[in-house]
Amino acid sequence: MKQPKGSSSISTSTNRTAGSGSKVTKKGLATQKAQKLKRVREMLASKKSEARQEPQTGSGGDLPRGVSKADTVNKPSGASKGSPQQTGLSTLQKKMQQKLKGARFRWINEAMYTETGAHTFKMVQADPSIFEEYHQGFAAQVQKWPVNPVDIFIGQLQSRSRAVVADLGCGEAALSAAVGAQHTVHSFDLVAHNERITACNIADVPLPDESVDVAIFSLALMGTDFIKFVREASRILRTGGELKIAEVVSRIADVSAFVTALEGQGFRLDHKDSRNKMFIMLDLTKISARPATFRAVPGLLKPCIYKRR
């Protein structure tokens, strides 16, 4: 049967309209999905940005005073408290820490110069950390010196024949470490910092009379009763033995009076080297036994007190 005239065109037109609506609907759904996906991506990107900017304080609260945001970034979560990764010290805090160490060193140094050797020995034996703190501070001072007297003594011993040496107030026994294979070196100080050292008051060392060829005090005449240290050196030195002293120039108010006091303990001055602006070097020889009694002369050596900064 033939279709009525015009029916074909109507049908075709209807089909086209339906097809066009289907295309519009699909296009709209695709646009909506794209917009949702875009919004999700933007949200994720925003959260990542916030996570990078927010410091990991652990509790989400404010940072401790003196700790910057930079100190809290990229810290391993498993690091223990107090580890280098989590100290988080600001520049100001580090400066304050160094000042506290410096103040502690000055206090220990002053105590050693203004007390007797026996008192200082008891103090350090009761708390050996005092010795460690002192020598850490002392090592920092040595780095500023143009020359270390210990190095001069090492050079002198390296150029002489075998001898028995007493290093009185040896510090960390650098002299023994340098020439111990060439000479017999007895090292004495307040604390046995290592196996080379015997802990004692250097006014009373565990050596027999006249058993030593060379006795050395390298910046070690620190107690108020330092003349007792010199008398002990005289006791352990053989007649003809050498006494070597390095001391800070500013401590000696009168070099002649200081030398006279040394000679009064059985020594003769052979050589004085005052070319170094910081230290004076004295070489003496034992020519007789120390006197049975002695009279201390106050003011021969001033305490070496570091300035407070």
Image (spheres, helix red, strand yellow):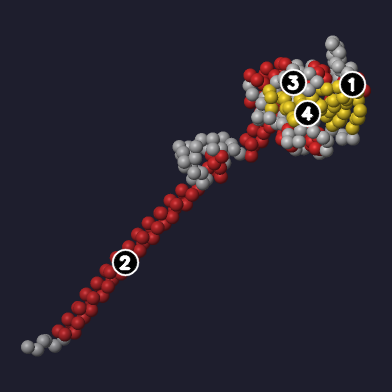
Q: Which residue is mark 4?
A: 164
Closest to the camera, between mark 3 and mark 2, is 3
Image vertical order of residue 113 relative to residue 151, above or below: above
Q: Secondary structure at mark 1?
A: loop
Q: Earlier in the sequence, mark 4 or mark 1?
A: 4
Quick one: 275 or 63, which is closer to the camera? 275
Q: Which residue is mark 1?
A: 287
Residue 198, image quadrant: top right
Q: CA distance from mark 4 to mark 3?
A: 11 Å
Quick one: 31 or 128, which is closer to the camera? 128
Q: Which residue is mark 3?
A: 207
Q: CA distance from mark 2 to mark 1?
A: 111 Å
Q: Are marks 2 and 4 in contact (CB under 8 Å)?
A: no
Q: CA distance from mark 3 to mark 2?
A: 99 Å
Kindly identify which numbered label has been placed on residue 30.
2
**Residue type for callout 3:** Leu
Closest to the camera, between mark 2 and mark 4, is 4
Q: Earlier in the sequence, mark 2 or mark 4?
A: 2
- At a point 47% along the width and 42% down the height, the residue shown is 77
Image vertical order of residue 75 relative to residue 137, above or below: below
Quick one: 19 or 155, which is closer to the camera? 155
Q: Are marks 2 and 1 in contact (CB under 8 Å)?
A: no
